[in-house]
Image (cartoon, helix red, strand yellow):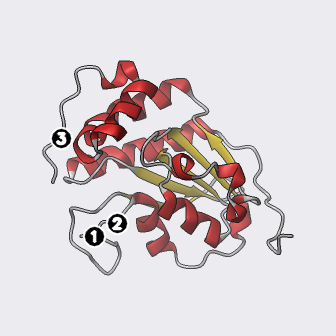
Amino acid sequence: MSTRPEPHTPPLDHARYLREALALAREGQAAGSAPVGAVLVDASGKVVGRGRNRHKEPQTADHIGDAGLAHAEMDLYFQLGNPEQPETLTLYTSLEPCLMCGGASALMGIGRIVWATADPWGGSGRVIEWSQHPAMQDTEVIPCPDAALEHEGAALFAPEAKRAFPDEGWALWQEKYPQETAGVKATGLD
């Protein structure tokens, strides 16, 4: 039995916030990091936090960086601290959160998670179904609610998937997103 308050996540314009997460992903890519962005929105629709991947950028007082755990969601949470009424918040990400970021979202008590693009290799869902994870029972999960934004996100992340994932992971990306991965060359990131 959960001790968390019931989620109170009213309907929001998912496409609007996913577009903002994708814009942050492009910022991360332009800065030399992986193209992943995240936006945290309260029940009234106000953006209360923004983050993007920063693993190729220096750590600062305001942003986590220069580490493998400098993912967009962790950047956002690092800035945010402990939010009041986290069950009323919605996390929007350009890419399905990994196990670390999905776990952090659950531990914080985030009420809803929405992502633009599935990650068939690095996403939490490859390891354990979101609905089956004990910590995620009180979190509403909405994968890929907009086909055009899913395509945009997959095309944006595909070069990073080719570069960063082993052959098995890249094969899963090619299977899930054949159009978006056709002819992709790996990024120059290390």
Tell me the kind of residue under disc 3: Thr
Locate residue 134, reporting x and y percent.
72, 63
Q: Nearer the viewer, residue 51 or 46?
A: 51
Residue 112 seen in the figure: yes
What residue is shown with label 1?
67
Locate residue 148, reporting x and y percent.
49, 24
How crowded pointer 2 is (Cα within 10 Å; few <14, some 14-19, many 20+) is rated as: many
What residue is shown with label 3?
187
Up the image or down, 87 lies above or below 131; here it is below
Tell me how far mark 3 sits from mark 2, CA to CA: 18 Å
Tell me how far mark 1 sits from mark 2, CA to CA: 5 Å
Tell me the kind of residue under disc 1: Ala
Element marked by disc 3: loop
Q: Are marks 1 and 2 in contact (CB under 8 Å)?
A: yes
Q: Is residue 48 left or right of residue 68?
A: right
Q: Is residue 133 left or right of residue 150?
A: right
What residue is rendered at 71% in x and 50% in y? 131
